[in-house]
Amino acid sequence: VKKSKAETAKTRQRIVEVAAEEFRRNGIHETGVAEIMAAAGRTQGGFYRHFESKDQLVAEACSASMDQLVAAAKSAIESGNMAFLKHMDRFLSASHCEDWSGGCPIVFMGSELARADVNVREVVSEGFRELIDVMAGSGSGSRAARAEAILILSAMIGAVTIARILNDPKLSALVLKETKTHLANRFRRQQAEGG
Amino acid sequence: VKKSKAETAKTRQRIVEVAAEEFRRNGIHETGVAEIMAAAGRTQGGFYRHFESKDQLVAEACSASMDQLVAAAKSAIESGNMAFLKHMDRFLSASHCEDWSGGCPIVFMGSELARADVNVREVVSEGFRELIDVMAGSGSGSRAARAEAILILSAMIGAVTIARILNDPKLSALVLKETKTHLANRFRRQQAEGG
DNA sequence: TGTACATCAGTGAACGCGCGTTCACTGATGTAC
DNA sequence: TGTACATCAGTGAACGCGCGTTCACTGATGTAC
């Protein structure tokens, strides 16, 4: 049953969106093509009308996830310091550890991404570069500002990665809390000094 | 062909060691029981003489990996400040990004561990607790010292996780370098203040 | 504008493959007497 | 100490299952005239 071009495009987009979510939730390897298609309201056979392979979908889904992350960071930064602190708090919250909608792909698929194919790593790398740019003030960012962005990102991603693994909710919360207060203090000091 | 108790114990230990390495190298899901047994010099059928399931092996292998990590950190700390700085440098090196022998399980299997079963998460959590204790000076560690340990661990694990994903060796090296210098400065400042 | 036809999104079954696990079997080990 | 036998580490083939991918088919879409 052929569909109109508009509907075809919508289906494709829906597959990518659903896949991005499922990959973050269950991991790349543990999420099957059939499962994604079912979640998108289609059967598995139609998948290859839209993508050459699962790997291609992985790359597009990761790209979409990174774009979402960059957009959220950008919007928070453009809304001023308080908004950015709030954004960091949300990233370092217990709910982000469990809630994969809009979650960070590097946190949710970290070790799988390191082993992913070249296209996947490329789109994630590009997203990470954009994140640094956004946080350091676009292309005008000084080397120091870029370094600061890298440190913040490493600390946030490391903390949530660890918090998600830990079995003990108290220790998990402690890791998040210490990182949160540390980054908040650091950010405020930076703002006071830098302007 | 039954083997002596001594040989049986040696085989079991070898399976765990080999598995710890392979899981870090290729991931938990992508490493098969047959592959591990072959690397241990046995055939797959014998696996279930030693373990109830692959999951049980995953837990023991992760436990071994964490023990190794804790032992390395402990030894570095007991050898003084310079040795500890050197240890951090090695953790944050390009070679650690690629070299999974003795690598950090949280870095190499991060997102898989978060989805692993309760026993696996438990042994990793216990290892992480020990890491904090070792770095904060055993049970005698103050709350501030434990907080400091958590921050250092988050930053290191985050940085290497990211560096491993990035496709661009220059950016990868930058992430590691900035984290390295930041942590070294921080550590030296801490030592000067605290004693 | 109307008609004939090629296209192609979507279906659902099938393919080959690799996985974790089971099984019948082998023969050296270690124990009971 | 010697002998008979139960045990069990290890083998290699087989099991069922789920995966990514392919395929013949359907019928609405969009195009050529």
Image: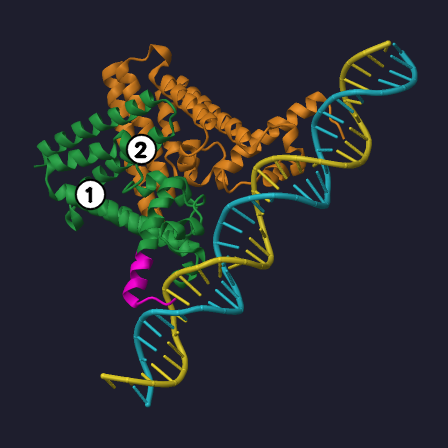
Chain colours: A orange, B green, C cyan, D yellow
Identify the mark at residue B73; answer none if there is no mark: 1
Does A192 sit above or below residue B87? above
Q: Which mark is residue A47?
A: none
Residue C7 x/y as whole percent = 74, 21
Give SS at disc 1: helix
Is A190 positioned to the left or the right of A140 in the image?
Answer: left
Residue drawn at x 37%, y 13% is A138
Task: Report the chain holding disc 1.
Answer: B
Which mark lies nearer to you, 1 or 2? 2
- Mark 1 or mark 2, earlier in chain: 1
Which secondary structure lies at badge 2?
helix
Specify few, some or many for label 1: CA neighbours under 10 Å numbering under 14, 14-19, or 20 or more: some
Q: In which quarter of the image is residue A142?
A: top left
Residue placed under numbered mark 2 in the picture: B97
Amino acid at dot 1: Ala
Q: Position of residue A140 (x, y in %)?
A: 34, 10
